[in-house]
Image (tube, rainbow, N blue to C red):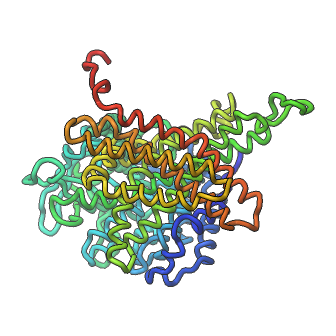
Amino acid sequence: MTAYNPPIKDMLFAIHELSGIDQVLQIEKFADFDTEVVDQVVAEAGKFAAEVLSPINIPGDQAGSQIVDGGVVAAPGFAAAYGQFSENGWSSLEASPEYDGMGMPSIVAAAATESWQAACLSFSLGPMLTGSAIHAIETHAADAVRARYLPKLTSGEWSGTMNLTEPQAGSDLSIVATKAIRDGDHYRISGTKIFITWGDQEFTENVIHLVLARLPDAPSGVRGLSLFIVPKFLINDDGSIGKRNDVSVVGIEHKLGIHASPTCVMSFGENEGAVGFLLGEENTGLTGMFTMMNHARIQVGIQGLGISERAYQLARSYALERKQGRTVGAKGSVTIVHHPDVRRMLLLMKSQIEAMRALAYYTAGVVDFSRHSPDEQQRANAASRNALLTPVLKAWATETAQEVTSLGVQIHGGMGFVEETGAAQHMRDARILTIYEGTTGIQALDFVGRKILADDGKAIRELIAEMRTLDDELNGDERLTEIRTALSEGVDHLSAATDWLIEQAPGDPDAAGSASVNMLMLAGTVIGGWQTARAALAITAGASSDDAAFAAAKITTAQFYAQHILPRARGLHAAATAGSHVLMALPEESF
Ligand SMILES: Cc1cc2nc3c(=O)[nH]c(=O)nc-3n(C[C@H](O)[C@H](O)[C@H](O)COP(=O)(O)OP(=O)(O)OC[C@H]3O[C@@H](n4cnc5c(N)ncnc54)[C@H](O)[C@@H]3O)c2cc1C
């Protein structure tokens, strides 16, 4: 069993060479930070992940969380780890200094998040959602409301949750039925929410639920949703904890993975109605919830990266130790890393992890520009790039995590299928990632609908044009020749599929839906190739020249991606543009 070891060198390479950190650090808001601070914070976050979170991962999986006396009791070690997490100030990394946050760039938070998610997904999911709640409150609440909630959430004394899902309303939020009734300066909320992550626990003083509900006179559909802050304990005027609100946890789910993360059935308003406070305006709740969800979607993409890295580390150490089979010229059995097929699997893992990491940190850099650049045009451009990349990072990285964690099991042979190696837990834990925060199908509809068709392909064509500019730079060094060709072909496929979609969608209502997931996976595959090519280019330009083995491995990894992953673009293009006819041909009873 291998403990998690944060790949600090790879992380810092992706930060310094691929994320845009140098330009981000020039933004006034980040004037207090320099590259030394960035490196230190990434290293310390990794150390915390390895020393405090990694050890609770397997015990947490085995024990799970429990309901005791109407409240959730977390798995052994989780409360203590949370105490240390908050004391170290990790809850406040990205939060605004105005509310006691450290105000660090999202790029730094992304790297720290990678370590924490890799070390223990079940634990890190809680602070992740608190971070998303902080972002939603900061963006949409009035000053007094911010002052009331943000310092306590930022310090980690309180936690935050996201309450959308109901038994009949999962992907389709237009049928959310939880009710909100006006009652003086607040509202009374009643209804049942299911699948609420970390809906309760015993180690924070308060739990702040962000709840989607509907007023009686609201329009139907998503336009009639409002967003409410519903604290577990009401807060007195002086900020102290008041009486218990009418909200309770009525059950937790038994599930495939992330056993230590309580997935709660929440009941609001069983008695007099839970007191809720409006966040934003009435009937604009989806806007606020999208602020929270888009933040969380990027984080879930990073969860895909983190769990993949952990699965890779375990598989790599097994491949370096396990002896089986012979190779020509070797005396006796060799370790399985000698076999070409095991190397293929390890490189499928490693190369896609590097692509995911680069995309995740790059996207975090785009977020920093979109929020804090002094230049309005740069903010707008970055916001559009962020909107385009968010569903890609969320869905492509998490789908890729399924492949990577499954390869982790495969490399272990039969030992991967039994629980004691830990490989199976990674695969089980990763399985939720393509489902929550909007399934892959829903991300793909967002990608083709809102992000491509709604702006007539402008944002994606700008990205395609930018990816093409790398072609010239890749010309010259022969180590990059194969990468250049494969990337150029991949970009051609993405471009042609985009043109097809824009042409076909107006005439066929099923065209976008039938192309969507293949389009998104095509985009992820090609953007991943662009990022690994950028990494190889940075090496040929002298990055990491003090470490020849590291530099050579980066080039080989990018070459492998070009040989084994980028050719998938051809198949994805073909499937994306096959049209809806065959897909929609079978009547329901023929399935
Ligand atoms: C462990 C766990 C934690 C969770 N945490 C939270 C949380 O903290 N807060 C919260 O509010 N929710 C949470 N959820 C709920 C989660 O977000 C939903 O499960 C998810 O959005 C999917 O909804 P559903 O389960 O109702 O599936 P459905 O919406 O019923 O989807 C079933 C299938 O149909 C597909 N589908 C549905 N509609 C369409 C469409 N229009 N076009 C194409 N395909 C479609 C989906 O892609 C999926 O494959 C959690 C769920 C789990 C399991």
For the point 64% across and 48% down, the residue is: 559
The answer to whether 453 is drawn above or below residue 168 in the figure is below
The answer to whether 584 is drawn above or below residue 145 in the figure is above
For the point 55% across and 52% down, the residue is: 355
**Residue 259 vs residue 237, the one in the foreground:** 259
Q: Quadrant of residue 128?
A: bottom left
Q: Residue 512 at x, y = what percent?
A: 28, 40
**Residue 19 vs residue 412, the one in the foreground:** 19
Q: Is residue 502 left or right of residue 318?
A: left
Q: Is residue 67 visible?
A: no
The answer to whether 454 is drawn above or below residue 152 in the figure is above
Q: Quadrant of the N terminus?
A: top right
Q: Quadrant of the C terminus?
A: top left
Ligand 1 rendered quadrant: top left
Q: Quadrant of residue 16?
A: bottom right
**Residue 54 vs residue 181, the one in the foreground:** 54
Q: Is residue 162 left or right of residue 549?
A: left
Q: Is residue 6 left or right of residue 447?
A: right
Q: Residue 208 at x, y = what percent?
A: 34, 62
Q: Is residue 588 left or right of residue 403?
A: left
For the point 38% across and 51% down, the residue is: 391
Q: Is residue 113 visible?
A: yes
